[in-house]
Amino acid sequence: GENVEQHPSTLSVQEGDSAVIKCTYSDSASNYFPWYKQELGKGPQLIIDIRSNVGEKKDQRIAVTLNKTAKHFSLHITETQPEDSAVYFCAASRENYKLSFGAGTTVTVRA
Amino acid sequence: DSGVTQTPKHLITATGQRVTLRCSPRSGDLSVYWYQQSLDQGLQFLIQYYNGEERAKGNILERFSAQQFPDLHSELNLSSLELGDSALYFCASSSTVSSGNTIYFGEGSWLTVV
């Protein structure tokens, strides 16, 4: 099955700086790569996703890149704000829809 | 608000007992997923239903079972509970089984087994 590895496990950044989280996946048939943000006591919330026919996608301060050849994808958050502090999960799936998640990255934005 | 509703939000029960967690998917979503989140295991896929039928199975224990009813709501039944079953259980839904549709998560049911 799919195996998703996520790094780093924790990330502390100064407000205004950028944060980058990287994930690798094992199943070359995976074609959908979402990113979720989970705040304390809440469920995972989709923040951005990318499909295998696209190399990069951007939504305001958030961007995701995908390298199918290397089987890795990354989340970039620019101009970080205190409300960006949360746990971020990457995930991967193929057409049967079972999302396999990375272990998560705890992001702390220092004011 | 994702539109996925889970009840109860919190549940404390004793070892050996049985509990039922309930999920109402987003309006119109045919697919329902159950995930377990614990500190040492992360988000683990348990089972998926599509329009009432089991679609995919993950690392779901034999003591656990689920079903999706004609009105598309789903229940996850956990029996012979053990201390290690304490976790957050998430339900999620999406509109079709086809690749790439967004999966929306509920707020979770926090189960504590004592």
Image: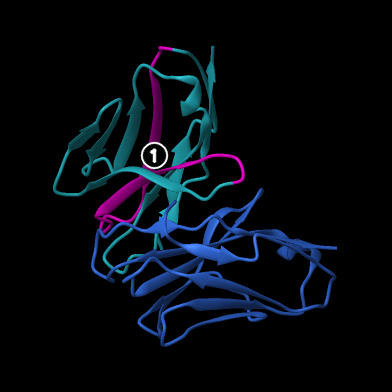
- Among the chains pictured, the one given blue colouring is B
Would you say A31 lies left or right of A1 here? left
Question: In the image, is residue A26 part of the stretch drawn in magenta?
Answer: yes
> Residue at horizontal 50%, vertical 21%?
A82
Q: Quadrant of residue B83?
A: bottom right
Q: Position of residue B21 (x, y in %)?
A: 62, 72
- Among the chains pictured, the one given cyan colouring is A
Q: Which residue is mark 1?
A: A23
- Where does the magenta region start and end? A16-41
> Residue at horizontal 22%, vertical 44%?
A68
Q: Position of residue A5 (x, y in %)?
A: 45, 44
Q: Quadrant of residue A70?
A: top left
Q: Position of residue B59 (x, y in %)?
A: 55, 69
> Residue at horizontal 34%, vertical 20%?
A78
Q: Position of residue B63 (x, y in %)?
A: 67, 80
Quadrant of the frame with the N terminus of chain A = bottom left
Secondary structure state at the residue bearing disc 1: strand
Label 1: chain letter: A
Residue type at numbered disc 1: Cys
**Picture mark count:** 1
Question: In the image, is residue A24 part of the stretch drawn in magenta?
Answer: yes
